[in-house]
Amino acid sequence: MKHLFFLVFISVCLLSHAGEHQLSVVSEHWPPYIIHYKNDTVQAEVKGVVTENIREILALANLDYSLNIYPWARSYHLATNKPNVLIYSIFKNEQREPLFHWFCPVYQATPIRIFKLATNSADISSLASLKNSVVGVMRDDNSYRYLSTKGFEPGVNLDISSNEEINLLKLITGKIDAVVQSEAALRYRLAQVNASNLAIVAGLTLHSKEKTEHCMALSKNSDAQLINKISTAFAQWQANATHADSNNTDAQFSNLR
């Protein structure tokens, strides 16, 4: 009987230790880079060119992990408050840099711009003129934080939503003047709501290519062995020239004027 209790105790300890260092991967639905396919009859799938790159890297690291899609604010909260959480795609900036272990890039830079309906008279050519409009942003994302530092305010010239699909619907129905998105993502989302022929005008480039490389980032207080495995795998992946040419995805949707 003592031997039985001992074996059970050892098994529990091993399971607890394994679970302690389990990698949790979190992201948001950001098509066409990260696509969360929802289906009531089968388990939801997560695809997209960036997701495939992340899977390749973690396969090289030989790690077990869970992958969950949440609104951006929740994913970011988990990554900044819990150990062993890997978040993607995330842009690296001065405020975020000390919060994570960074792995950049996992995908080419994606400029983020201001867009409006062609029928809307708002001037979106500069930050100064944009302040006279209402811009739809996601809660706590990079664009929301950037515009906040430039004097934009929720309820005045910022309208906050939990995801970009809501922002797009608000744009189409005239509840907001502009949205902040990548060109490829905007065209993808328009197609999803059968609005591909809608006339859209591009304005100010909010984040240039130099600041919009897709990265993955591991929470700062993560397990040292986990950090080393991911670092080694990322270096191997970078040296491998066979992963997909990322230019194809953006080019497919780049037809705005």
Image (cartoon, helix red, strand yellow):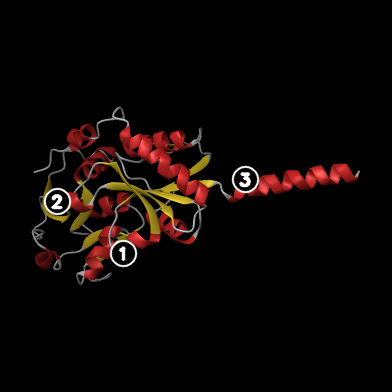
Question: Residue at left 12%, top 42%?
Answer: 256
Q: Quick check: 221 above or below 67?
A: below
Q: Quick check: 223 above or below 241?
A: below
Per the image, label 1 sits on a secondary structure element best described as: loop
Answer with mark 3 or mark 1, whichever residue precedes in sequence.
3
Q: Dividing the picture into quarters, in which one does residue 177 lie?
A: bottom left
Per the image, label 3 sits on a secondary structure element best described as: helix
User: Callout 1: few (<14), some (14-19), or many (20+) C-alpha neighbours within 10 Å?
Assistant: few
Answer with mark 2 or mark 3, whichever residue precedes in sequence.
3
- On residue 117, the disc is 2
Residue type at the position of mark 2? Leu
Question: Residue at left 62%, top 45%?
Answer: 18
Q: Quadrant of the N terminus?
A: top right
Residue 91: image location, x then y, percent: 29, 53
Whole-angstrom CA distance, mark 1 to mark 2, is 32 Å
Per the image, label 2 sits on a secondary structure element best described as: strand
Residues marked 3 and 1 touching at CB (< 8 Å): no
- On residue 4, the disc is none
Residue closest to the far right = 1
Which of the two marks, 1 or 2, is nearer to us in this view? 1
- Residue topped by disc 3: 18
Residue 56: image location, x then y, percent: 40, 33
User: Callout 3: few (<14), some (14-19), or many (20+) C-alpha neighbours within 10 Å?
Assistant: few
Residue type at the position of mark 1? Gln
Is 220 displayed left or right of 92 in the figure?
right
